Amino acid sequence: MNSKKKIKTVILRRFFGKMLRAAAVCMAALVACLFLGKTILGSYVWYGTEGIYPLIHWISDNQEIFVICMFLVGLFFIGIFYWVKLLNYFEEVLEAMEQLNYVENFVQLCPDLQEVEQYMNTLQKQREQSERRAREAEQRKSDLVVYLAHDLKTPLTSVIGYLSLLKEEREISPELQEKYLSVALDKAGRLEDLINEFFEITRFNLTHLELEQSTVSLKMLLEQTVFEFHPVFAEKNLSCELEIEPEGLKIACDPEKLQRVFDNLLRNAALYSYEGSTIKIRAKQSGSLVGIQVENAGATIPEEKLGRIFEQFYRLDSARQSKNGGAGLGLAIAKEIVRLHGGSIRAESRQEQTVFTVELPAV
């Protein structure tokens, strides 16, 4: 039972409980008044000529009917009273909902609606946190675009400069030509990476991810991803160990998108690993879930940053560095892809070991 159903059950139970107690008090009061009236009226001598004698005589002969009628009248007034009270509750809640539009303004309701008050204030806190995260993400995005635009100038200037030298200097040696071309090509590659980051930002905002699922071998998927990273690992003299239990483990997934998840995890592992260390990939089925872990040896990620690395446009680097360039979208996209597969992803970092764990439903 979710929180809204619990709140509704508690409030209705309290509301109708008060109504039932009021009805019981009304019945007890009627019975008490009847006996008290009989005692008081029995002490008088009646001659039958009094104006109220016929009424008293009828009540005396029809006590059950009188009590029932008076009880129904009492219930009618009790119902009106609590109906008005219920309308007041609605009005109070509606006024409180209007207050939710104002930031840092928590609602206060009557004691009978304390559960609603707590629920609405919880929603208010969550809304404020979501708005704050959205503002921070937008600010990070804006900063990132500024950084990218600035970074575009450097490789572009180098490409233009070296190509201009090749055009103007007709008699330079082949070795120097080769050097200029290599630098220009390297800078052009960097320029392409930066432009791809711009496209990545745009795609994240405009593209809705849809899955095209099929049953694939997890071992083949991971081996292919690792093979593509051999040049990246070689730059830092990294090695990679792959361990899968059982080896024939299969999962139902969108292979292309899931490979993007592992690509992002391996890219981060390679980027932040110590030189000459080993990246370990482990996959194991446990019940209805398949767990895939990517572990690397590197600087421990602080707890406050660890809780935010899956946010869009969030980067571990406090300052932008070209060699660690990235839009800060890789892990955010990975989390969304894993979520669409019905799984989960989390990160742990302690004692210079960082582990990313992906859990997916088994076939």
Image (cartoon, rainbow, N blue to C red):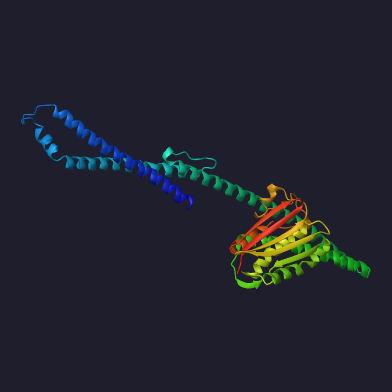
Foreground pick, 64 / 105? 64
* Residue closer to the observer: 58 or 89: 58
Check the picture and name the quadrant holding the C terminus: bottom right
For the question of whether residue 315 can be seen, the reply is no
Q: Between residues 142 and 16, which one lies in front from this camera angle?
A: 16
- Residue 183 in the figure: left or right of residue 43: right
**Quadrant assignment, res 16:** top left
- Residue 47 point in image, percent of width and height: 6, 29
Residue 224 in the image, given as x and y percentages of width and height: 73, 71
- Residue 150 visible within the image: yes
Picture layout, residue 225 above or below residue 64: below
Residue sitting at x 78%, y 64%: 240
Q: Position of residue 143 (x, y in %)?
A: 69, 51
Quadrant of the rendered image containing residue 144: bottom right
Q: Which residue is most to the top?
A: 44
Residue at the image position 46 percent from the left and 50 percent from the top: 4
Q: Position of residue 211 (x, y in %)?
A: 59, 68
Q: Is residue 341 shown left or right of residue 27?
A: right
